[in-house]
């Protein structure tokens, strides 16, 4: 089994990836949150910073591209290839309304003819291996059969499936019966993504899908960075959640100028902590109520 870090926009940036990689059980792949090339295929300054090789040293990083225009994809691909990347990922899974409304991410799945033309062109012209991260449809699970038939036409590096529709966002339970169908019918290596927050949940999933090639962990790792060590039953001494938060507290102050933005970024990690460790919610509420980095540091005994 291979283990991947999910790309969470605004969260799993190069600072988080480097810090996690230094302190905890390493991932086989680290997916860089989606890049949005402009009409000339150029990336923003922040996005260029996120993909710099020196900011991803020592890890296998895979940039993810969010677009529905072939020229944007191919221009970004050429730039990433010049940096030495060997694989890129196409985002067909983001369910955010502002993304879907522009026909990107999961919204692109609503235009199967346009998606087919897009995939025809990028696979004809691309010089880098391409994987796809996808939802199983826009509104209905019944959309997935035709979608998988489309994906099977192309030489994907792998197919990463979050078995919910775009409309479902993160609500309800993943449609694991659809993932089981994909395991039977896909001609590509498959990676599962969705709602694995604890070792027990992972073990239950693994018993049901022992033939899976890979699993992608996102919110579970953000809430418990020791999750992969627990899954692998690696009992060597490890760093702690608080050590991770202290490292991020220092690193983001160097990277981000405005204190309120640093504090907002740090608080967001505790939102994921609350998903996994409900017993800490009283403390987490106190963290949410801090208004300055000084208050935050005092509460956590960082200073």
Image (cartoon, rainbow, N blue to C red):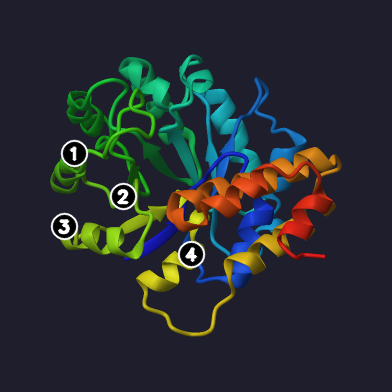
Which residue is under mark 4?
27
Instruction: Name the secondary structure under disc 1.
Output: helix
Which residue is under mark 3?
208
Q: Earlier in the sequence, mark 2 or mark 3?
A: 2
Instruction: Name the secondary structure under disc 2.
Output: strand
The image quadrant of residue 149 is top left
Q: Earlier in the sequence, mark 4 or mark 2?
A: 4
Marks counted in the figure total 4
Q: Residue at x 55, y 78 (%)?
A: 238
Residue that protrudes farthest toward the front in the picture: 282
**How crowded is the residue under tag 2: few (<14 C-alpha within 10 Å), some, or many (20+)?**
many
Q: If the image is split into quadrants, where does the C terminus sit?
A: bottom right
**How crowded is the residue under tag 4: few (<14 C-alpha within 10 Å), some, or many (20+)?**
many
Separation (CA) of disc 1 from disc 3: 13 Å
User: In x, y percent, where is residue 297?
Assistant: 77, 57
Closer to the camera, 22 or 40?
22
Instruction: Name the secondary structure under disc 4.
Output: loop
């Amino acid at each position: 089994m291979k283990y991947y870090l999910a790309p969470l926009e605004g969260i799993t940036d190069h600072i988080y990836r480097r810090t996690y990689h230094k302190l905890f059980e390493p991932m086989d792949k680290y997916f860089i949150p989606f890049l949005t090339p402009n009409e000339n295929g150029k990336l923003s300054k922040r996005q260029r910073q996120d993909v710099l090789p020196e900011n991803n040293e020592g890890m296998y990083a895979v940039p993810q591209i969010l677009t529905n225009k072939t020229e944007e994809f191919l221009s970004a691909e050429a730039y990433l290839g010049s940096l030495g990347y060997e694989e890129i990922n196409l985002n067909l899974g983001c369910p955010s309304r502002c993304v879907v409304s522009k026909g990107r991410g999961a919204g692109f799945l609503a235009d199967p003819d346009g998606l087919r033309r897009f995939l025809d062109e990028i696979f004809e012209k691309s010089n880098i291996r391409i994987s796809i991260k996808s939802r199983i449809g826009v509104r209905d699970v019944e959309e997935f059969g035709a979608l998988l038939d489309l994906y099977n036409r192309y030489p994907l590096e792998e197919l990463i499936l979050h078995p919910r529709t775009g409309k479902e966002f993160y609500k309800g339970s993943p449609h694991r019966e659809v993932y089981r169908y994909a395991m039977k019918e896909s001609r590509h290596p498959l990676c599962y993504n969705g709602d694995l927050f604890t070792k027990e949940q992972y073990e239950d999933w693994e018993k049901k899908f022992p033939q899976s090639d890979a699993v992608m962990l996102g919110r579970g790792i953000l809430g418990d960075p020791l999750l992969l060590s627990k899954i692998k039953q690696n009992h060597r001494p490890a760093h702690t959640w608080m050590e991770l938060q202290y490292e991020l507290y220092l690193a983001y102050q160097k990277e981000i100028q405005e204190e309120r933005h640093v504090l907002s970024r740090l608080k967001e990690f505790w939102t994921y902590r609350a998903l996994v460790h409900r017993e800490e919610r009283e403390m987490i509420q106190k963290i949410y109520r801090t208004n300055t980095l000084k208050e935050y540091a005092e509460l956590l005994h960082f200073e």
